Structure formats: structure tokens, C-alpha cells
Image: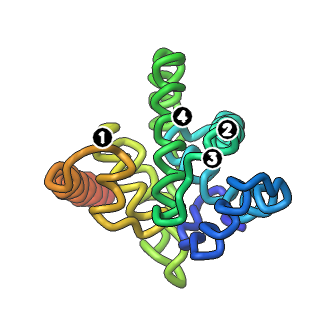
Amino acid sequence: MATNDTINIAANFCDEDGRLMACAAKGDDTAFEELVDRCQDGVIQYFKMLCRDSHIAEDLAQEAFIKLYTSRNRYRRTAKFKTFFYRIAYHTWVDYGRRHRATLVSLTEVSELTAPQVKEPLFEQDTLLSAEILDAVVRLPEKQKQVLLLHLLDDFTHADIAKTLSIPRGTVKSRMHHALQSLRSTLKTDEHHET
């Protein structure tokens, strides 16, 4: 389990998830419950990295799973499950943003004031993202943050991200490039202020 200062970004998706979703699409509720158990930690982390609030993240994850269940008949095994699911999660986040713009602004302001100041390595055993990096990611513009989180959370390819967000692959590359530039700049500035 990840601590408050780190986020586990280990890849959780595999062929088994697609098989379970295909079974759920045929009416197997036990398969869907197993799928939820397998995927809930990852999607909660995704939402938490977007809003920095555990309760909201859990509510959004639950909403995403409800949407997944109601759209289970549209899933085709030829599609990657993680792309299908994170497309639903992304639209859940967008819908939440439309309903709660003022809340999102205040959450961003609070996260900047209360961001952890712990210094840790960028990756610890290839699964943990440092609090410093996490704080820099949270401060990115929304579109850049989305592409970077999808890449970090489950090693999405540019093609996967393009399908998930319904944008051209070139746009994904551009946003990723700008996100990484912003991160480098932010981290250099923070490092400079400490010396």
C-alpha cells in the first residue's frame, strides 16, 4: 500500500482483465466484482492525483465503475480493457469538473499550500512516485496532466492515450513533451530555491 507521500504506479492491467470484462458483458456479475477488486486501487490513485482528495477520488472511482457496468455490453475483447476503462474514468473526471469547477480551483489552491515537502527518489523499486514529483504533476495544466498520468499509471502508449482521450497521436506527443518540459523546469526551480 502506498504511503501519503508516495503513489504506487505499478501496472495493474493484463489480459485477464479483458477476459473478466468480456464475461461481465455476458452477464457474469461475479466476473465484474473480481474486475472491480483488481482495478479499484489504480483508478482511485488516478483520481487522487487529479484532485488530491481521497474521498472525492473514491466517489469518482465508484461512479466510473457504475458507468463501466452500465456500458459493459459495448465492450469488445478486441479493445484493450485499460483503454476502454480509462476512457470512462477520464469522462467521469470531465463530468465532475463541469459540475464542480469552484471546488476544483480551491482543491488546487489547497494542494499547493499543503503539498508534502518530503524529498524521495523519483522511483523506488520502479513503483513509487516521489511526493516532490507528484506535487509538480498536480500543478501541470489539465491537458498535460492527463496524458502524463495515463502514461505513468499504466504505461499507456501514445496510441492508447490518443484513443482514451479521443485526440490525435501528435497532440499526445506535444502535450507529453510540454508536460515533461514543465516538470523539469519546476523541479529545477524548486531545487534552486533549496540551495
Q: On the image, which quarter does residue 103 sit in?
A: top right
Q: Residue furthest bottom?
A: 125
Count neighbours of disc 4 (C-alpha within 10 A) and say few if under 14, some if 14 to 19, many if 20 or more: some
* Type of amino acid at the residue the image marks with label 4: Thr
Which residue is located at x 81 percent, y 57 percent? 28
Frontmost residue, 4 versus 31: 31
Residue 3 position in % (x across, y down):
67, 62
User: Is 142 situated left or right of 93 in this image?
Assistant: left
* Type of amino acid at the residue the image marks with label 3: Asn
- Marks 2 and 4, how far apart in space? 13 Å
Residue on which the image places disc 3: 73
The answer to whether the residue labelled 3 contacts the one labelled 2, judged by CB atoms less than 8 Å apart, is no
Q: Is residue 139 above or below residue 28?
A: above
Residue on which the image places disc 4: 92
Q: Secondary structure at mark 4?
A: helix
* Type of amino acid at the residue the image marks with label 1: Lys
Residue on which the image places disc 1: 143
The answer to whether the residue labelled 2 contacts the one labelled 1, judged by CB atoms less than 8 Å apart, is no
Residue 185 position in % (x across, y down):
20, 55
Q: Is residue 73 above or below residue 133?
A: above
Q: Is residue 15 visible?
A: yes
- Of labels 1 and 3, the one closer to you: 3
* Type of amino acid at the residue the image marks with label 2: Thr
Q: On the image, which quarter does residue 152 sit in?
A: bottom left
The answer to whether the residue labelled 1 contacts the one labelled 3, judged by CB atoms less than 8 Å apart, is no
